[in-house]
Image: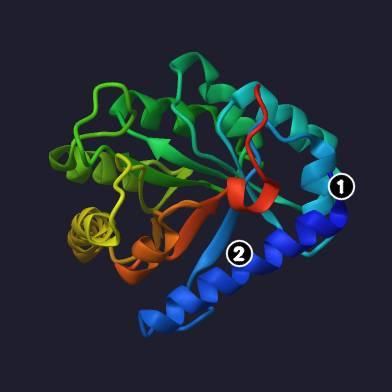
Amino acid sequence: MDPEFLKKNHQKTLERIQRACQAADRDGQAVALLAVSKTRNAQAVAALAALGHRAFGENYVSEGVDKITALADHSLIWHFIGPIQSNKTRQLAEHFDWVQSVDRLKLVSRLNDQRPPSKPPLNVLIQVNLDGEDQKAGCAPDQLPALANAIEAAPQLRLRGVMSIPAVRESANDQRAVFAKLKALYDELQAHHPSIDTLSAGMSNDLEAAIAEGANLVRVGTALFGPRQNR
């Protein structure tokens, strides 16, 4: 991947985040960027890391583990953001720093039991399915409290917050409305678990709306790396 192309896109994305923060009267340092590197090769990740970026998100376990292994000397932070199969939890627990897509109790116990004691607790976000889409991962909003309690009780896990991937909405008002629902769920959860600090929402096409409604971690792939490659 052309380093200049990547450098330009990275700068543009950071500027978008800054403008969105200014428009929402928020501190420009309040929102972190997660580079979604699924389907991108290790060389592309290394090129972005060379610009000083450290946090990357993967959707496919085996692909992510391969990159984590190949780039082990780059001191990167790896988030898993895809749907979780039960038979993949050991790889997640052993290799990733964050898992953003926990959505059922079975995963909590497996990740906790499989996290190596030599590693710090695995940072966990609960994925919420705001639109009730059958084809999309995520728990129902009313399942949040039980999941949060289970994660907080797991010694090898650290509850950090919530994540969601809402259905696509074209207007900014509609985007903001669904992210406002997510922020309300986050605030309610934080009232019972004061240590949580991460609201992961917003992607290349709607990060401004997410930031306006309180997201502090946005997940961006296409705007950084260009059109997605076929896997």
Farthest residue in the left direction?
A: 142
Farthest residue in the top direction?
A: 87
Is 226 situated above or below 136?
below
Image quarter where the C terminus lies is top right
Q: Residue under label 1, please give it.
A: 73
Q: Is residue 157 visible?
A: yes
- The residue under the point 28% across, 56% down is 171
- Residue type, numbered disc 1: Asp
Q: Quadrant of residue 104?
A: top left
User: From the viewer's perspective, is 137 left or right of 203?
Assistant: left
Mark 1 surroundings within 10 Å by alpha-carbon count, few (fewer than 14), some (14 through 19), many (20 or more): few
Q: Residue under label 2, please give it.
A: 13
- The residue under the point 68% across, 26% down is 63
| In-front residue for pair 120/224 | 224
| In-front residue for pair 53/8 | 8
> Marks 1 and 2, how far apart in space?
26 Å
Q: Secondary structure at mark 1?
A: helix
Image quarter where the N terminus lies is top right
- Residue type, numbered disc 2: Thr
Q: Is residue 71 visible?
A: no
Residue 228 screen position, x and y as percent: 63, 35
- The residue under the point 60% across, 38% down is 117
Is 177 situated above or below 37?
below
